[in-house]
Amino acid sequence: MDSQKHPDDSFQLYHHTLKSIPGAIKWYGNDSVSFAVALDQTIQRLKASRLKKSFSLTVHLPDESISTAQLEEWKNNYCIEKTLEHRAEYCLMKRQGYQFLLKGILFLWACLSIVYLLDTMTTLGEYKKMLGKETFYFLGWVILWKPVEMIVFEPWLEKHHIKLLKKLEQTPITVLYANRI
């Protein structure tokens, strides 16, 4: 597709002491922690864009008290820290999913055993048997949904976050100083 039809996403961060820039992310403070908060907001906006697109990151500062190299270092440290967090969350989710799956299979086995027992009982009427069997079939299979969701679907979100962070890490920062304009 033509690059003119899909322009690069541009993210603007500006220091709170500067004049408001519409649509930009306001950055409070002059340290890595406050910059990380602004990067969190950038990631939230980046989630809506397609991963195939490239984007630019421009930081507007009032003076030269913070260098481009320092901002790059803060950004890279942020990306490394957040990537480690999302990888740990991914591993935890998979481990818990398999633990829940084992418990769910045991519960399903118990439910199917109860269905078998209900089927062999002659003292219950046909309607009560059918109602009991359907209830335990339903319970047994529905209980497996959460482990399947944790193993198959939820890790996609964590993988997506990791891809966004890699993309952010590869994006150079452009710094515009107000005193040079």
Image (tube, helix red, strand yellow):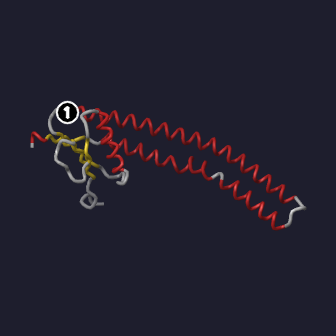
Q: Which residue is mark 1?
A: 67
- Residue 42 in the figure: left or right of residue 91: left
Residue 139 pos. (x, y %): 70, 55
Residue 3: quadrant of the picture: bottom left
- The kind of residue on which mark 1 rests is Ser
Q: Residue furthest bottom?
A: 127
As helix, strand or loop, the secondary structure at mark 1 comes to loop
Q: Residue at x 77, y 64 (%)?
A: 131
Using the image as rendered, state which of residue 121 and residue 51 is in the foreground: 121
| Quarter of the figure with the N terminus | bottom left
Q: Residues within 10 Å of mark 1 (few under 14, many from 20)?
A: few
Q: Quadrant of the C terminus?
A: top left
Query: Residue 110, image x and y in percent?
Result: 76, 49
- Residue 114 relative to residue 34: left or right: right
How many numbered discs sit on the rendered protein? 1
Where 95 falls versus 51 (above or below)?
above
Q: Position of residue 5 (x, y in %)?
A: 26, 61
Toward the viewer: 2 or 85?
Answer: 85
Residue sitting at x 72%, y 51% = 108
In the image, residue 145 lies at what x, y percent?
62, 53
Q: Residue furthest right?
A: 122
Q: Residue at x 9, y 40 (%)?
A: 180
Q: Residue at x 25, y 42 (%)?
A: 27
Establish if 98 lies above or below 149.
above
